[in-house]
Amino acid sequence: MAPDSRAGGHVAGGPSRRHRPPVFGNLLEMVYRKPSRWSYTFQTYSCLSRLKVQLAAQSPRSPEAVLVFERSVYSDRYIFAKNLFEIGHMTEIEWIIYQDWHTFLLQTFGDQLALHGFLYLRAPPEVCFERLRCRSRPEEKEVQLSYLEQLHVQHENWLAKKTTLIHSEALRDVPVLILDVTKDFENDPNEQRKLVGQVKTFMKTLCSDSLPSISTTVCK
């Protein structure tokens, strides 16, 4: 977790490589190579990792601070695990077990996992695929465009069309800000300012007595 002075908050990313237990090896590469064998294992570890990140971020901070998570335990279930089940890489019994313990975790930790908003970084799958190729991570070399297209559909159904069946009543009404990130904002200061302005306006609309927290979600 690193402080982001520009936004006046904290950004909590996913677990870094140095924090991955050696026993897991490169689990991401393994699931891309043999998805039917490793999908349930990967999603179990992925959700556990996101749970740890969200819980670790609950330490006392300034009332004005905003917690921003790269992804959340919710995207783990309603995007990635759901997609793997629907394309046949998780069996029905694995999907049932995953949902059962996921629901149990949400009930157990309750407000500690609550989010005040979602930032949906929307871009065409083709653009995401090109960016994935440019960053050239060895473990992602097996990723196909078709997989990113599937994730795009899952994001659209959940965050834009709102047709995904959500089992958490508190999650159904969480506000969503859709950000068009088709353009190369990483190297365009004007695009960066525009996106930051939209995020700041969105955060002002989130009224809560507790520490504001939001999650970003993007295909890749």
Image (tube, rainbow, N blue to C red):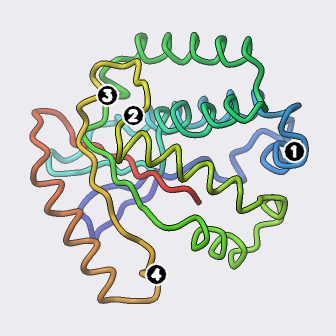
Please name whichever residue, 110 or 159, is drawn nearer the observer in this view of the structure.
Answer: 159
Q: What element carries label 1?
A: helix
In the rendered view, would you say 99 is above or below 118? Answer: above
Residue located beneath label 4 in the image = 186
Which numbered disc, 3 or 4, marks the residue closer to the eye? 3
Which disc number belongs to residue 163?
Answer: 2
Q: Is mark 3 on a helix, strand or loop?
A: helix
Q: What element carries label 2?
A: loop
Which disc number belongs to residue 159?
Answer: none
Q: Where is residue 116 in the image (x, y as percent from the top left)?
A: 24, 39
In the rendered view, would you say 53 is above or below 97? Answer: below
How many other residues sit within 10 Å of disc 3, few (<14), some (14-19) or many (≥20)? some
Using the numbered discs, state the Cα–Cα distance from disc 1 to disc 4 in whole angstroms.
30 Å
Using the numbered discs, state the Cα–Cα distance from disc 2 to disc 1 in whole angstroms.
31 Å
Residue located beneath label 1 in the image = 30
Residue type indicated by callout 3? Leu
Q: Disc 2 vs disc 4: Cβ atoms closer than 8 Å?
A: no
At x 87% / y 45%, what residue is drawn? 30
Residue type indicated by callout 2? Thr
At x 26% / y 81%, what residue is drawn? 193
At x 64% / y 53%, what residue is drawn? 16
Residue located beneath label 3 in the image = 171
